[in-house]
Image: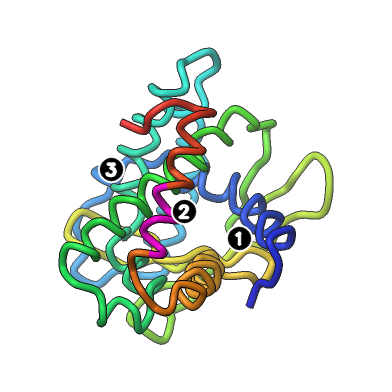
Amino acid sequence: MVKGRGQLKMVMQRFAFVVLVLAAVWAQAFPVQAAPSVTTAEAFVKSLADKAINAVAEPGIPDEERARRFRDLFTTSFDVPAIGQFVLGRYWRKATEPEKKEFLTLFEDVAVLTWAGRFKDYKGQTLTVKGSKPGNEGDILVESSVDQKEGHPLSVVWRLVSEEAGFKARDLVVDGVSMAITYRSEYTSVLQRAGGKMDGLLGALKTKVAQLQEVSGPAK
């Protein structure tokens, strides 16, 4: 469990390059797998590193175009609905269908606006796949490390699931900290302060989106 806004911000910054690497892959480059293997999953992650940067980290492109490119890649590489449902936890069951739809839209907007801007900070980090194994929920866990020019290498575990269009990520665990659990911790705190009402979280997310748009422009 992540506590404190300062620690939360630090943890989320660690995900920046990892998300950058994952989002830059084209999902259609991978054929449908009837029974995905750990070898296939490792190849997927290796390809992420090979194809990273080309689309979204291109120097000099406008922030709005960067966000548009990132959204396209993010939605093909991440299982956003499944992550959103996990992030809300028990509050997902209590939410109405319109609230769920609005939450997923805002959750995607926050992710796109947050991470797209970080692509400008890429400084040549590299990712090395260390191995993989089947998970406990029909998923595959790919272990890797991100070598940084400054600081210690980051340990990164990718939790992948196979869908008809190819692999998608449902979580990243960086130095032992789960991205999905980090979001869940943050949003649960907001909901608790709002008495469990979705309006409180949706309002907070709208404010966050507006703040990010002031910096980078609309996320298209």
Q: Position of residue 76 (x, y in %)?
A: 29, 47
Left or right: where does residue 60 sit relative to residue 174?
A: left
Q: Where are the magenta residues, as a range? A: 200-206
Residue under label 3: 29
Q: Amino acid at mark 1?
A: Ser
Q: Quadrant of residue 97?
A: bottom left
Crowd tier of the residue under label 2, counting other residues whose Cα lies within 10 Å: few below 14, some 14–19, many 20 or above: many
Question: Which image quarter is the C terminus in?
Answer: top left
Q: Are marks 1 and 2 in contact (CB under 8 Å)?
A: yes
* Colour pattern of the rendering: rainbow
Give SS at disc 2: helix
Q: Residue at x 35, y 84 (%)?
A: 90
**Rendered residue at 79%/39% (across/down):** 149
Q: Camera-side residue: 111 or 167? A: 111
Q: Given the image, on which type of amino acid does mark 2 rest? A: Val
Q: Residue furthest right?
A: 151
